[in-house]
Image (cartoon, rainbow, N blue to C red):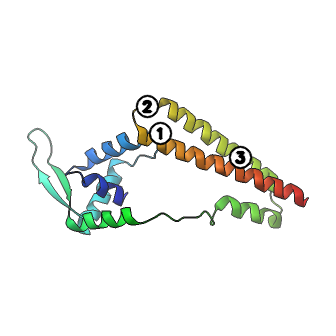
Amino acid sequence: MRLPLLALLARGPAHGYELKQDLEQLLGSAYPQPNVGQIYVTLGRLEKSGLIEGEDVEQSSRPNKKVYHLTDAGREALHAWFEETEDEPRVRDEFFMKLALAPQTGLTDQIALINRQRRQYLNTMRNLSKLAAAENRDNRIAHLLIEGAMLHLQADLDWLERCQEELEELE
C-alpha cells in the first residue's frame, strides 16, 4: 500500500479519504479495497520515514483534515519503484506443496486435490466474469486487472490439467 499511495500523491496533495476513493475508482471492485484506517496508518508511517509531509487544514464545519504531499525522498522512492521489475516465479506454491506431500501422508488423493483446486479456480473465474460485466466499461484499468487475473487463472487451470495427466501416467 505504501508505494501506490506515493504514486497517487505524485499528482498533487490529498487527504487519506481522497486517496482511498482514488484507489477504488482506479482499480474497481476486483481489487481488494483497503479500509480508510489502513490508509491513515500507512500515511503516518510514510510521514515518519520522510517520504511525505502532512499539513493540518482547518475546515469550518468539520474537524480539521490532514493533507499530504510527496517529499523529494518520496519522489525518489517512487522513481526507484517504477524502475524495479517484478520477478516472482511461483516456485513456492502452497497448492503444489500439498500435491507433492499428499502421497506421503496418506490423508488425501492427489487427483482429488487437483479437482478441488480446479473447482476453486473455476468459481473464481466465474466471479471475475461477473465483476467484469458489472464494472464500468470506461474503467480500462479495472478491466485490465480482471483480464490479467483471468489469464493467470487459465494458466493455473492448464497447469492443473498437466499435473493430472502426469500423475495418471504414473499410476
Nearer to the camera, 59 or 131: 131
For residue 68, side relative to residue 7 (left or right): left
Of circles 1 and 3, the one toward us is 1
Please provide percent x and percent y for residue 146: 51, 42
Nearer to the camera, 92 or 89: 89
Which residue is identified by label 3?
A: 118
Please give the name of the residue rendered at 69% of the width and 48% of the height, measured from the top-left corner.
157
Query: Which badge, 1 or 2, comes first in the chain's sequence?
Result: 2
Nearer to the camera, 157 or 38: 157
Label 1: element kind? helix
Position above or below: 41 against 137: below
Q: Is residue 30 visible?
A: no
- Corner quadrant of residue 91: bottom right
Please provide percent x and percent y for residue 6: 29, 58
Say few, some or many: other residues with alpha carbon within 10 Å of mark 1 (under 14 / 14 to 19 / 20 or more).
Answer: many
Label 3: element kind? helix
3 and 2 marks in contact (CB < 8 Å): no
Q: Is residue 97 visible?
A: yes
Label 2: element kind? loop
